[in-house]
Image (cartoon, rainbow, N blue to C red):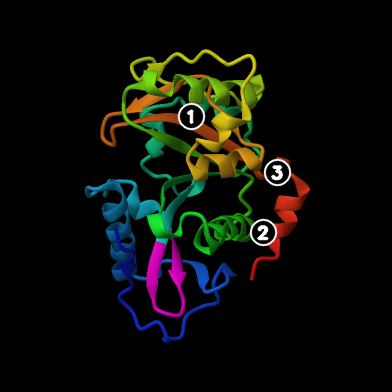
Amino acid sequence: MQAAALVHDASALLPPPLARVGRFSARLALTEAERAAAHRVRRAVFGFSDADRFDADCDHLLVCDHTTGVIAGTARLLPASAARAGFYAEAEFDIAPLLARHPRLRFCEVGRTCIAPAHRHGAAMHALWAGLAAYARENAIDVYFGTASLPGADAKRHADALGYLAGVAAAPDEWTVRARPERAVPVAPLTRPGAGLRRRLPPLLRGYLALGAYVSPEAAIDPAFGTTDVLVTTRLANAPAPYRTHFSHSS
């Protein structure tokens, strides 16, 4: 699976990136053509066109190889202030009570996050995280939230992984988000979650856990993607200090 090519000359003048890690930079898509390029990356990774009614309201983060103009990954960002049509995650999880409990905090949904397989354990993934941190700083975002997926809609396959998440990342009451009853999958927390289960989680989900994220007490099925999802909520001020310092200096 190949990363997608950008539609502009890699040597063209561009605003400074949000972050730079090695030969990769993270910046926002500036044109319709670049947003279309982000869609091509998503289609290549997910295996189908996932365009929807939320795309128009989102900022689209691009992880680019700035030496070649190739996109290695992308994510879309939807601040609550721009969510005219609501949030994608609301089809699976009841988000409104969470926002109502924290009226002074600025929330932003992160979704459609993907990195081409060849780049998932290197500088491109690092650049993605650094770009998300920089976007939060520039837009005064306090909380990132969104669904994180395990492959396949048979939640029984993921009983141990879901139990691990419920055991190590359970939210206090004021941060709990419930799955919608028609999509909900009950989860039994593991009383002794082993470290081996953490290593088997998708890299993106492991990254959120490292930032101190909370995970919903139930999972939900996303029939469009055929995945088993959890709702991940990350209050950025709660991230461990080394992570905040590390990402704030990525350049």
Give how far across and how far down residue 71 sits, in percent.
38, 67
Highlighted range, magenta: 61-72
Count neighbours of disc 1 (C-alpha within 10 A) and say few if under 14, some if 14 to 19, many if 20 or more.
Answer: many
Q: Which mark is residue 239?
A: 3
Dot 2 lies on which element?
A: helix
Nearer to us of marks 2 and 1 is 2
Three-letter amino acid code at the position of disc 3: Ala
Q: CA distance from mark 2 to mark 1?
A: 28 Å
> Which residue appears at 32% of the width and 30% of the height?
152
Residue 23 vs residue 232, the one in the foreground:
23
Which label lies toward us, 3 or 1?
Answer: 3
When the figure is inspected, residue 155 is found, relative to residue 246, above or below; the finding is above
**The disc labelled 1 sits on which kind of residue?**
Ile
For badge 2, the amino acid type reads: Phe
Looking at the rendered structure, which numbered label has been put on residue 95?
Answer: 1
Residue 140 as seen in the image, left or right of residue 244:
left
